[in-house]
Structures are given as C-alpha cells and as structure tokens.
Image (cartoon, coloured by chain):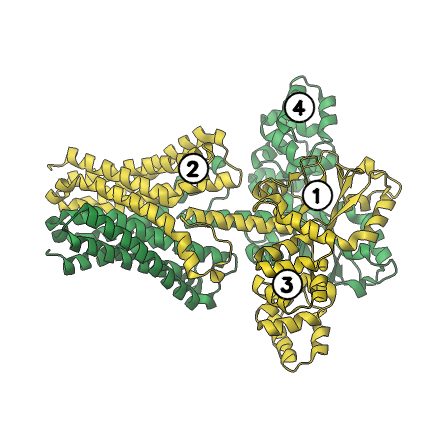
Chain colours: A green, B yellow
Amino acid sequence: MEKKNNFEVLRALLERRDYHALQAILAEENEVDIAEFMEELTSEQATVVFRTLPKELAAEVFSNLSPENQEAILAAATDQELSAIVEELYVDDAVDMLEELPANVVKRVLKNARPETRKLINQFLNYPENSVGSIMTAEFMDLKKSMTVAEAIAHIRRTGEDSESIYTCYVTDHARRLEGVITVRELLIAKDEQKVEDLMETDVITAETTEDQEEAVSRMMKYDFISMPVVDKENRLVGIVTVDDGMDVMEEEATEDFEKMAAMAPSEKPYLKTSAFTLAKHRIVWLLVLMISGMITGGILGQYEAAFAAMPLLVTFIPMLTDTGGNAGSQSSTLIIRGMAVGEIQLKDFMKVFWKELRVSMMVGVVLSAVNFVRLIITYPGNEMIALTVALALFVTVLLAKTVGGVLPMAAKLFHADPAIMAAPLITTIVDAISLIVYFNIATALLPL
Amino acid sequence: MEKKNNFEVLRALLERRDYHALQAILAEENEVDIAEFMEELTSEQATVVFRTLPKELAAEVFSNLSPENQEAILAAATDQELSAIVEELYVDDAVDMLEELPANVVKRVLKNARPETRKLINQFLNYPENSVGSIMTAEFMDLKKSMTVAEAIAHIRRTGEDSESIYTCYVTDHARRLEGVITVRELLIAKDEQKVEDLMETDVITAETTEDQEEAVSRMMKYDFISMPVVDKENRLVGIVTVDDGMDVMEEEATEDFEKMAAMAPSEKPYLKTSAFTLAKHRIVWLLVLMISGMITGGILGQYEAAFAAMPLLVTFIPMLTDTGGNAGSQSSTLIIRGMAVGEIQLKDFMKVFWKELRVSMMVGVVLSAVNFVRLIITYPGNEMIALTVALALFVTVLLAKTVGGVLPMAAKLFHADPAIMAAPLITTIVDAISLIVYFNIATALLPL
C-alpha cells in the first residue's frame, strides 16, 4: 500500500505520455485508488487517464469520482463513449451522478442511454431525497422457488456478472412479488438436490421504496444484513439496498446530526468543496434566531440593573453561571438526542430519563456548588452571603439545565419535530435566561440590594 | 413483521407451558427477534425459552442478548450446556460476552471450553480495547492458490458451515501468510478449470491486529469491503473484520464523538443502562474544568467593574454577545472536527480552512452586526455610540470565534491530541473571555466612561 509512491510513478508515465505502461499498471489497481489518483490531476489529464481504462473498470472508477471530474469526462466524451459509460454503471451510481450534473449534460446522457436504462433511471430520479428508493440498487440476483440448489448455483454462475451484490438471493413469483430470501452461503452448504423452496426464509424483512433511508438502514444494522430487499406497495421486488450504501447513509446521517446540533443547516457537499457563501448561508439563520433570544435574555438582565449597579461584583459571576448551565444542559441533551437517533431511548422512557437526569444533576450540582462556595469564601472573605447566593444559583441552574436538556429533545420528538433542534445552542439560550432570573432573585432575597 | 402480536402469542405459549408449540415457532424466527423477545421476559423465563432452541440458533440468539441475560443463562447452565454454548459461538462473540461477565463466570466458561477454543479466546482477550484484534472474527474461509475454481467451490461447500463470513476468501501459504484474496462472486462467475492463483487479487488491503479499529473500519468503508483480512506483524492471517462489526464500530465512534464534543467522558453502556452515579462521574470533570475557566472570564470582567457601574446598560448585552460568539465558534469547530473524523479535512488543509472561516465569519459578522445596530438604534434612540460599540464588538467576536473554532481543532490534531477536545464547550469558554475583553475595550474607547 505504498500508494503515494505509486501515484508518482503513474504521474511520471502520464507526463511522458507512455500510455501503454500506464494502462498496464492501472488495469491492476483498485478502482478507489485510481479515482483518488485522478482527483489530483487536471481535468484534461483525468480524461486521458480515464480513456486508458478497460470498460468495466472505467465504470467502477467513474462512480468513485467527484462530480466535477465526472462532468469533465462526460463533457469530453463522444456520444458513443457516453452511452458505454451510462450502460456500464449500476443504476444507483448513474442516478447519483445525474443528480449532481447540470441539466444539459443530464439530457445528453439520457439521450445516449438505451430506452430501458433511461426508464429505470427516470424512475429512480423520482424517488424523494432520503428515501430508500433513492439509495437502492436495481441489479440483484433473483431465483425461482422451484429451482434445486444445483440449478440455483448454475443460474448465479451464469448471471452473476451483472449484479452488484449476489450474496443474498431473492425468490420471486411470476409477478415479481417477493416470496423468500436465501443466501449464497446457505445454497453452497446445502445439497445439490435440495429445493430452494424448502431452504428459503419466507418471513422476509424488507424496506419500502418511500420509507426513510435512515430507518431502513438501522433495520439492516439490527439484523446484520449485507443487503436488504426493497419492495413497492404491492410487495413487488424493485431493488436492494447494499451494506456499503447503508454505511454511507449512516455516516451522512451522523454528520447531519452533528451539523444540526451545532445550529447549522445540514450541507450536502464536503466542507472543503462548499463555498464560503453557502457555508455562511447555512449558519446565519440559527445565529440570528439565537442572537435574538440572547437579546431577550439581555432584556431580562435589564430588569435587575439596580441590583448590579448597587453591587457590580455580582456581574462577574454571570459568565461562570451561564457557561456551566449551558454545558450541563448540552451534556444531557446530546446524550438523549444521540440515544434516540440510535434507537436506545424511546418516548416511553420519558420518566426514566427525567428521573435519571434529576439524580445526576443533584450529584453534579452539589459538587460544583461546593467547589464554588469554598472558592468564593477564600477569594472574598467576609462575603459569605454572596458565596451562598452564587452556590445556590449554580445548584438550581445545573438542576434545571439537566432536566430541561434531558426532557426537551423528547418533547420535540413527541410533537414530531426533530429532536436535534433541542441541542446545545437552544438549550444554552433557554438555560441562560432561566439561570439569570434565578440568580438575581436569590440575590435580591439574600443580599442587601 | 407483526412482531408485537407474535410476542403476545409466544408469551401465551410460555405461560401455558406449551414448550412444544413454542419450540416450533421459535425455530422459524430470526435470532435478533428472539433475543428481543427474551429481553422482555424475566431471566427465569428467558432461560426456559433459551433451552427450547436448537443448538446453532441458540448460539446466534445468545450473542444478541444483553450481558444481564447472558449471565443469567450461563449461571443456570450445566457444565455440558456451557461447553456447548461456548463452542458454538463465534470467537469474537464469545470474547464480547466474556468481557462483560464477572470473573467467576468467565473462569467457569473457560474451564468448559476445549483447549484450542480456550487458547483462541485468551489470545483475543489480550488485544487492546479499540484495536482491530478486539473486533475481529477468527472464522474465515481460506483457500490455496493451487486450487482450481471447481476445487475452491467444492472446498467452500464442504467447510462453509463453520465460517461467519465466506464471501471473501483468503489465499494463504503453508505458513498462513496472506498471498491473495478472491471473492465468492469472482469464483462463481469464473470457469471451473481456472486457477485461483490466476484470478486472485494479490495487492491485498489489510489491517493489523494492533491498529486502531476506527482507522481500519474507515478503510473498509472507503473500499466498500464486506470483510477485511487482519494480519500480524509477520503478515500471517489471523482473522477478519466483517462489515456488520464495522458498522457497529462506526456507530460507537460517532457516539463517542458526540459525547466528547459535549464535554463528557465517553460511556460504554447505553444511557438507560448506565447508573446515575456513573453518568455524573462522566460529566463532572469537564464541568469543573469549564467552570474554573468561567471564573477566569469572571475575573476579566471584574477589571471593568468601573465601566458597568457607570453604565449598567452595557451588562445587558453580555449574554447576547457571549452566546453568539459561542454559537458561531462551535459551528466552525463542529464542522472541522467532523470533517477530520470522516477524513474529508486533513492537516495540510489548514490554510484553506483558515481562509474559508475568515470569509464566512466576515459575511456572518456583517449581517449579525447590522441587525444588532438597527435594533439598538430603534430600542435606545439617541444612543448611537452604544449601538456602534455593541455592533463592533459583535463583529470582532464572530470573526475571532469562527477562526479560533476552525483552527484550534486542527492545532490539537497537529499536537496529536484528540480534536474533539476543541469542541463547542471549550471554544465557547475561550471565545467568551476574548469577546468580553474586546467589548469593554471598545466601550472604554468609544463611550464616556
């Protein structure tokens, strides 16, 4: 795996225009590595490299390229080359590609596809974003239940070349309705004369085309499947979701959650490929909303102007108080949001979560308040009442922050909103306001203001 | 998939002690579903259900049970049953189980395992946590390069029953050194008389036993593998990592990042199964650290006591200013930390990130400051200089927050620290301190204090 050295060799051959040697080396390389190499070239060079690849490898490399390079290659391709590319690609990869391309290129690609391919692609393009349909693969291995094991294996050996994933075979009837599922492993360890019908699993776990991709993938994970059948409303088998696409979905969904939980609109492209303007756009809405909430907190603070005019020292504890409240709350909300995302926490656990956060916040609150109290007694000797005020306010803040942080994401889910909305930034803002009210009320009660 | 109904039926049979009917239904069920059903029973009931299962299914169900139920079943098992369970389990599942059990149970289980099994388990138990060795599977399909396709397929059919994952076959020499890799799909679509040697891929992408599991899994994902060979320092094949275990690692690592980024020590068990005391322990350290930083910020604020004693209105803008700074910074740090975790951002992109965050923060800063300025002019007519102070301070805060938030996680990585440490909570604390200094310095310059 001394890839970097290898890239140097390839680049040297390219610059020497020794396409013959280049071709020989590339034919032995992994498609992912070739795509990575091409990403470092100019789009003219990438197009040259692409043309040296054997047809099947070319399609595999193509589906691993960035949209920019795909577009460059398509733009330089003749109609015939275009047709070869789109026919060799698996339908899901073709669709992924077309979704990123400008309309005129899409039109040209579709024009050069065979009518059946075009129909299939159009169908796939119509599935809503984030639906199972939008990530499924059209090529799968189907068997008939009347086959013997020997016949089934022979069938797989004959037709396996065209399927992305052959290890789980689907048994369908004449109307393409899904009747059962059998793995290649089960076929291989069975006896030749056994019937598929007797071996197949009939209680099949499926996904529906319009179902949310995240749900389908978490079901796939639960059952450790390497592919999952996708059916339409009439239980007709229309495609499969493969585990590698499932992993991509998982990674994307986790990234989306990270973004949402840091108060951003989720982005579709990687950070480095997103323009500064788009990034700014994704961030500004929530910043504005939270800034306005911050102003409201400021308004609350304004009510106590007399208090901190009389005792300016009180103001210096505000950052510590609001920061700790925010941190305590976001710890809780993060755990609950993530727990719900991976299915470990359900709505029915509401009371358990509430009770657990209450106990945790008591323990944490007592420790933090005690540390604070001691520190204030030492720093400001003779001001016991101020120390008590701060310690008490801190305790109540932690208690509120953690219960609010634990409970609000679940409340959001209850009202069918995305729990991630109740993440750190919003929790912090809410807790800030509450903690300041608590702080100054305790202060006015305990101190001579 | 009307599982809930099915559970009712099963429960009724269990209560009627109709073990015969229970056995018949369970034999047809998926192991994951049976385990889920057992989790809802008392441990006595679960043990009864477990005993009705056929041996192989029993092992599969067992590896899907919670540690609590595993322990209960093992405690109730005779030595002979114990031996049957441990021998039927795949080694990685056996190891997962043993890691969760009390020492006396582990001892009893190991005593009842065959010597070879015991040796293997002990070897696996020695791999460090989070290493590839700790998640790998010992059962894999190995072939010899001298085999023909027909011989290889016959070999797989004869021995496939004992391997968890047969779809990628590994070609080893007499010393178990890895020579090549070939998929079952490639074997099946090849001709019977072709040689494995001529078909196999020799440039094998591997993982090492001591490598970090996260790195190995992200390589697996990059190449869309359904299993990856694990070798020792002498390139001897010792196991494989399967894609389902890879997905679990991905999910765990994402969860760990969520926890770290919300200033918590990562937990090993699901939230609902973690005690309040453990949760509190995981949260308190960072809360203390951040609270003390908050005190420092308070100290900084104390230096300007004269300023806000003279003009208490200034204090009311503090929450808005620090909240917005914190949010702006954590947006940036979250994107960068996640981008590094999934490999989209590398250290060499440092200047790109810096430049991008600078431009984004300018755009965002201008909008937020403008909104604030207009709002303050309207709310406090005649106080243009105060409005200007707040708007300017906000602009500088956003600028600093975003560049600091973008750059610090990369700096952490540069010094081989975990970038997740530079997440929202710490960034917020740092930005708070800076923004307050900026605010009061601008205030003292512009206002008659």
Q: Amino acid at mark 1?
A: Val
Nearer to us of marks 1 and 4 is 1
Q: Amino acid at mark 3?
A: Val
Can you give x and y, in whole percent of width and height, for residue A78 in the image? 68, 31
Say which element carries label 3. helix
Q: Are marks 1 and 4 in contact (CB under 8 Å)?
A: no
Q: Which chain contains the residue that carries disc 2?
A: B
Mark 1 and mark 2: Cα distance apart in space: 36 Å
Say which element carries label 4. helix
Looking at the picture, do discs 1 and 2 lie on one chain? yes
> Crowdedness of circle 4 by 10 Å Cα count: few (<14), some, many (20+)?
many
- Report the residue marked by disc 3: B32
Q: Quadrant of the C terminus of chain B?
A: top left
- Report the residue marked by disc 4: A10
- Report the residue marked by disc 1: B238
A238 versus A84 height, above or below: below
> Crowdedness of circle 2 by 10 Å Cα count: few (<14), some, many (20+)?
many
- Report the residue marked by disc 2: B409
